[in-house]
Amino acid sequence: MDQNVFAAWNEVFEDRYKAVAGRLEEWRDGKGDSLGEALGTFVRDAAGLCLEMVELERELPSFDWEGKDLAQLLAWNRKLHRGFLEEEYPMSWANPAHCVEALGGDSRVAVLLANLYASLRTWRGYAFEHRTSMMALEGERLLEVFDALETGAAEGLHDSLVEVLRAQELSQMETVMEQNLVRRMDPAFRTYASILEEENLGDPRYLFRYGIFLGENELETARHLAALPEGMLEAMARTYVDAFFRGYARDEKDLTGKKTVNLSYQAGFEPVLRRAAALFRERGLLPLVHFDLEGSPRPRLIHTKSSRQLEYDHRFDDGILLTEGRTRVAADLYDRLLEKHHDLVTGMAGPAVMESFGEKPFVPAQNPWAVKYTPEQTEQKTVHTSRMNAVYNKHLPRSAWSFTIITYPLPEIGPDYEAVFQETIRVNTLDVDLYERIQKTMIDALDRASHVRVTGRNGNRTDLVVALPPLKDLERQTNFNNCTADVNVPVGEVFTSPQLKGTNGLLHVKEVYLFDLQYRDLEFTFQDGVTVDYACANYEDPEENRRYVQENLLHPHQSLPLGEFAIGTNTTAYAMARRYRIGKLLPILIEEKTGPHFAIGDTCYSWSEDLPVHNQDGKEVMAKDNERSICRKTDVAGAYTYKHTDITIPYDELGDIVGVTEQGEEIPLLRNGRFVLPGTEELNIPLDALEEAQGRNRD
């Protein structure tokens, strides 16, 4: 059972855990009253929250799941997330603005305490995973802070607290890092996989066993899928699993020695995932299920956030601890631990992701007290990310694993949910051979071009020239990957890594949602393939708009290269989005197939540029590097950005896509948003049908 994974750690920390619980009781019961009313309340609330999780950990083995109805479990679930709910957040100790106002004094201290309080939401996960060793370590950190508040002078308190937090992190780093590695890669960790594979999925109460915050999306999804025909669930699972293995076959990667697969999915999709887990087991891969306890922009177990504003405000909290010494220690330790758990690491075949879409877009408030990186911290974050990724790729190179991603709608998408769900199944299972043939026609034409010009219409100001690297042998080589439905489902794009030199102009979209955030009139100006200017129109102040783009799309960089240029061909998906008026809610996985898209950041081949890739016709894809990524041979740290954000121009904002040869001959692929290259006209059928239907509706 999964508890054995952490049993040895828990035994080592047993006495410390008991001592922590005892001391927390003292602080909860008034030990901090001498700190003053506001700070005393903060200390009592923080200690009380931790003790509630201590009690929860004791109760869970005998918790009466079947004896509670859905309403009781919903109330219990909300209680578990008390202090971190959206409606509570304005007055929560996790809110830096509230802490600054309520505590007074040095605002830097208040912000530190808000960040510390926000981190306590991991205790709930520790309780469900029975990781009392981690509760002991986190409790000791909290108590060190309490002691510093009690004994430290107001002057210099901030620096003292930072030193406490840094010292505690370094002393705990090995245990924290190793436990996180084990729960990510060891199939013996079964806390969440056992829910997926063993619980009664016909009763939505199984969802509460995760400990995650639950909303209507999770509950209604579980009900909907439980009612679907067995054959449909089986087909969805098989589409997902087959796509994963097609990715290995497409990229000529070796499955020998692979033992596990990371299942990442939307809570509520378990009826499909259980069948997928069985199919993976038949192919020799055991399921891994875990998620980030503090939240993540791309969580492994997707679910409704208790507070989206909270997660937005705390996205840069690690800046407080960023130092060169920390990075050095973390990278060395990570290297040793990956070597120690070599078999677990190399046995991981990759992630199989079933995402969701339909959640209403989020427009965050700008919290003036949320942590922002200093220029020095920004630079250190870049170094830290590069070092940690380099270590990971040393032990599990990109050439040694693959992935797949597929997506389905959530009930929140609106009254057409069931119809959109059925339509999405159809989009995810379109005729791969048809698209492969049409896309080969496009690629053959594009390979004759030295550059491609993309322009917008209907208010879209895009005018961008994308340079393509020269090919030596058109019979055997190509610049574009013919992407069908393997690693990215659904079918429908051809993509390349642009040559940076000669890539110039403006990329503009009137409205787009990226990582659940809205951008109005988003634009990037490129010069020799690198962003030199950017803007949006979310706020009245131009500088606030620039800051919003930089913090959420470029950070920790000030500029990014154009890592990908692609032409999406899935006009069926585009027509679905327009027919049901859900274009704003489409995930990038589908949206990128509904027009040309451009990715700022790394190429699609980062860390695997030297691995041969061939299209279905046998031609080798040559455009896997650009002028930045090629630096990996001499400067790995400067070669990668660890960013890749796709930005799509929808067909109704698209003017033309025209290839231009070295001799100046134009090769039109699309004109006014319609496919005009001979052999691709069939892609216009869904667009024509949509236009005809819209005309009838207007009449």
Image: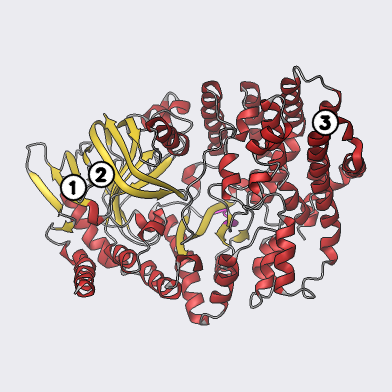
Q: Are marks 2 and 3 in contact (CB under 8 Å)?
A: no
Q: Locate residue 308, reporting x and y percent.
A: 57, 49
Which label was assigned to residue 446? 1
In the picture, the quarter occupied by the N terminus is bottom right
Q: Could you say whether the residue bearing mark 2 is in a helix, strand or loop?
A: loop
Question: Which residue is identified by label 3?
Answer: 144
Mark 2 surroundings: few (<14), some (14-19) or many (≥20) residues within 10 A: many
Decide: is 11 above or below 583.
above
Is 321 displayed left or right of 534 in the figure?
A: right
Q: Could you say whether the residue bearing mark 3 is in a helix, strand or loop?
A: helix
Name which residue type carries label 2: Asn
Magenta-colored span: 256-262
Which one is closest to the eye, mark 2 or mark 1? Answer: 1
Question: Which residue is identified by label 2?
Answer: 479
Q: Do the residues labelled 2 and 1 touch (CB within 8 Å)?
A: yes
Q: In which quarter of the image is residue 78?
A: bottom right
Distance in Å between CA atoms under marks 1 and 3: 62 Å
Q: Which of marks 1 and 3 is nearer the N terminus?
A: 3
Q: Look at the image and say whether residue 56 sits in the magenta stretch.
A: no
Q: Can residue 141 be seen in this view?
A: no
Q: Quadrant of residue 377?
A: top right
Residue drawn at x 64%, y 67% as measured from the top left: 196
Which label was assigned to residue 263? none
Which one is closest to the eye, mark 2 or mark 3? Answer: 3
Q: Locate residue 526, reporting x and y percent.
A: 28, 32
Q: Can residue 229 be seen in this view?
A: yes
